[in-house]
Image: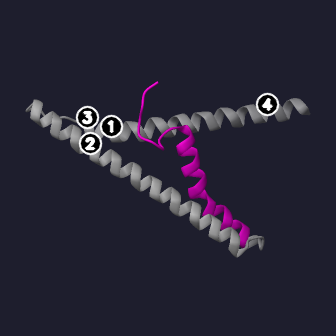
Amino acid sequence: MTAGLPGTGIGGFFYLLSALLMPVNECIYTVLGRSRPARWRKVSRQTLCSLGILAGIWCTAWILAHILHCAHQLSSSAPSEVPQLLRIAALTFGLATLLAVILVTEIFGIIAALRKR
C-alpha cells in the first residue's frame, strides 16, 4: 500500500462524485415538487464542502508538482514530464478504480435481481 493525496482514494472520489451530483438530484426533486428548503441547505453545504476538498487536492498536487519540478531541475538539466504525469496519474487511476468498483457492484446487483426471478 502506498500513501497518496488525501481524498483521492475510492472513498474520497465516491464522496466527491456523490456530493457534486446532489444538486442535479435535488433539481429533479424540485421539478417533481418533492424538494424543501432544508434539503437545499444540506445540498449546498455538501456541494461547497466537496468543492473545497477538490480545491485542496488541486493545490496539493500543484505544490507537489512544483516541488518535484524544482528538485528535478536542481539535479538534472534534462526536461521532465514527471510533475505533469503525477497530476494526471493520481486523478486517472483514482477515478478508474472507482468506476470499476461501481461497475462491478452494478453487475452483481443485476445478477442478484435476475436470480431472484
Left or right of 109 on screen, residue 94: left
Distance Cα–Cα, label 2 vs label 3: 8 Å
Disc 3 marks which residue? 82
Disc 2 marks which residue? 65
Q: Which residues are magenta?
A: 1-30
At x 52%, y 59%, the residue is 49
Choose mark 2 or mark 3, whichever is in front. 2
Residue 40 point in image, percent of width and height: 65, 70
Indicate the secondary structure of the residue bearing disc 2. helix
Mark earlier in primary sequence (3, 4): 3
Indicate the secondary structure of the residue bearing disc 4. helix
Residue type marked 1 = Leu
Crowd tier of the residue under label 2, counting other residues whose Cα lies within 10 Å: few below 14, some 14–19, many 20 or above? some
Q: How is the image coloured?
A: one colour
Mark earlier in primary sequence (2, 1): 2
Crowd tier of the residue under label 4, counting other residues whose Cα lies within 10 Å: few below 14, some 14–19, many 20 or above? few
Q: Residue 88 lies in what quarter of the image? A: top left
Magenta span: predominant SS is helix
Q: Residue 93 lies in what quarter of the image? A: top left
**Residue 26 within the segment the image draws in magenta:** yes
Q: Which mark is residue 6?
A: none
At x 26%, y 39%, the residue is 83
Choose mark 2 or mark 4, whichever is in front. 2
Mark 2 in CB contact with mark 3 (< 8 angstroms): no
Residue type marked 2 = Ala
Distance Cα–Cα, label 3 vs label 4: 42 Å
Crowd tier of the residue under label 1, counting other residues whose Cα lies within 10 Å: few below 14, some 14–19, many 20 or above? some
Residue type marked 4 = Ile
Disc 1 marks which residue? 86
Mark 2 in CB contact with mark 1 (< 8 angstroms): yes
Against 33, residue 86 (above or below) is: above
